[in-house]
Image (cartoon, grey):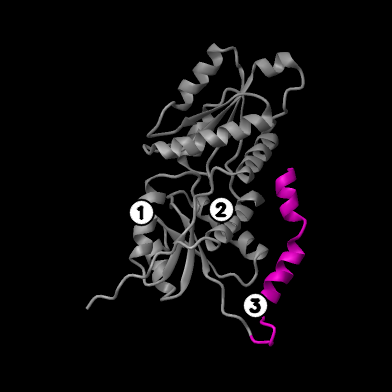
């Protein structure tokens, strides 16, 4: 287990106790519930994705008992985000995208759905880039067989392709490149971001470029939140090893809560939609 994620695991009991005590005022009366954490997933036709997301939400609930945790999808799976928000009525909610970078869904789809809901909402930042994601990527690579080169000759032939879904939004590429930079610092070898669709370079192009530079010990790091078509396709192109998607790595549950807490520390909210006359 890595240093950052280990630090988060050292205090689960105190976290639960603090949460329970925080729900009780000094006069013994129960405080109002905190704003709901609504995890916003993209949605997928792959049943493994939905199973992974539900397990991840269970981890969040275990870390923060007493916090209302809900799920809403942008498309393809129930419950859809508008339905989840409608079920909250006029309550407060923080929407945390289960997405790894900025893009159309984060900038447009989610805020528009939030603005149309009766609830008072805040939209948190996507999960990436963040050091906790680098923890998860590193652990997944180690699980797949990665060993950081100890001699210079091996280091000169080693590299990693960070395989992401891809987006036409340049901010998404910026976020993915930042994650690649952080992972490269962690591994001590080049890490090249590449994409399954909508952006360049492709996985194949990145692999050819690395090979031309004499980098033949190349791993593909799966920068996906759950198993699915893109993750499977990218892994199949690995010339050496490919890591599993981030999935239910504990760092993701901690990062969802971090984004929730940080959003509450800011003042920006989305006011509920006005009722039609």
Percent x, y of residue 106: 41, 50
- Residue at horizontal 37%, vertical 34%? 198
Q: Which residues are magenta?
A: 1-29
Q: Say which element carries label 1.
A: helix
In the image, residue 145 lies in the stretch drawn in magenta: no
- The residue pinned by badge 2 equals 52
Q: In the image, which is nearer the foreground, mark 2 or mark 1?
A: 1
Q: Tag 3: Cα neighbours inside 10 Å, few (<14), some, or many (≥20)?
A: some
Residue at the front extreme? 267
Percent x, y of residue 163: 52, 33
Q: Tag 1: Cα neighbours inside 10 Å, few (<14), some, or many (≥20)?
A: few
Q: In the image, which is nearer the foreground, mark 3 or mark 2?
A: 3
Q: CA gap, disc 3 to disc 1?
A: 33 Å
- The residue pinned by badge 1 equals 109
Query: Is mark 3 in CB contact (under 8 Å) with mark 2?
Result: no
Height in image: 112 above or below 189?
A: below
3 or 1: tag closer to the N-terminus: 3
Is residue 75 visible in the rendered image? The answer is no
Is residue 32 visible in the rendered image? The answer is yes
């Amino acid at each position: 287990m890595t240093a950052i994620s280990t630090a988060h695991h050292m205090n689960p009991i105190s976290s639960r106790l603090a949460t329970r005590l925080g729900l009780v005022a000094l006069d013994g009366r129960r405080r109002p519930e905190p704003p709901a954490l609504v995890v916003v997933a993209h949605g997928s036709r792959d049943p493994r994705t939905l199973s992974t997301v539900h397990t991840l939400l269970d981890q969040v609930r275990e870390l923060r008992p007493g916090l209302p945790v809900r799920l809403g999808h942008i498309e393809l799976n129930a419950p859809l985000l508008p339905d989840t928000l409608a079920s909250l009525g006029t309550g407060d909610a923080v929407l945390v995208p289960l997405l790894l970078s900025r893009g159309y869904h984060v900038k447009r789809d989610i805020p528009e759905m939030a603005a149309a809901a009766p609830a008072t909402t805040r939209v948190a930042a996507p999960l990436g880039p963040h050091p906790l994601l680098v923890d998860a990527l590193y652990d997944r690579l180690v699980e797949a067989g990665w060993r950081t080169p100890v001699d210079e000759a091996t280091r000169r032939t080693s590299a990693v392709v960070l395989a992401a879904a891809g987006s036409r939004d340049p901010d998404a590429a910026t976020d993915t490149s930042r994650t690649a930079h952080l992972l490269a610092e962690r591994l001590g070898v080049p890490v090249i971001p590449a994409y399954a669709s909508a952006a360049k370079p492709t996985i194949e192009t990145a692999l050819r470029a690395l090979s031309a530079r004499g980098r033949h010990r190349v791993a593909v790091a799966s920068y996906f939140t759950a198993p699915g078509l893109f993750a499977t396709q990218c892994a199949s192109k690995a010339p050496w090893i490919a890591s599993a998607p981030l999935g239910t790595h504990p760092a993701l549950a901690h990062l969802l809560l971090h984004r929730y807490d940080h959003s509450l520390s800011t003042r920006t909210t989305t006011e509920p939609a006005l009722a039609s006359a």
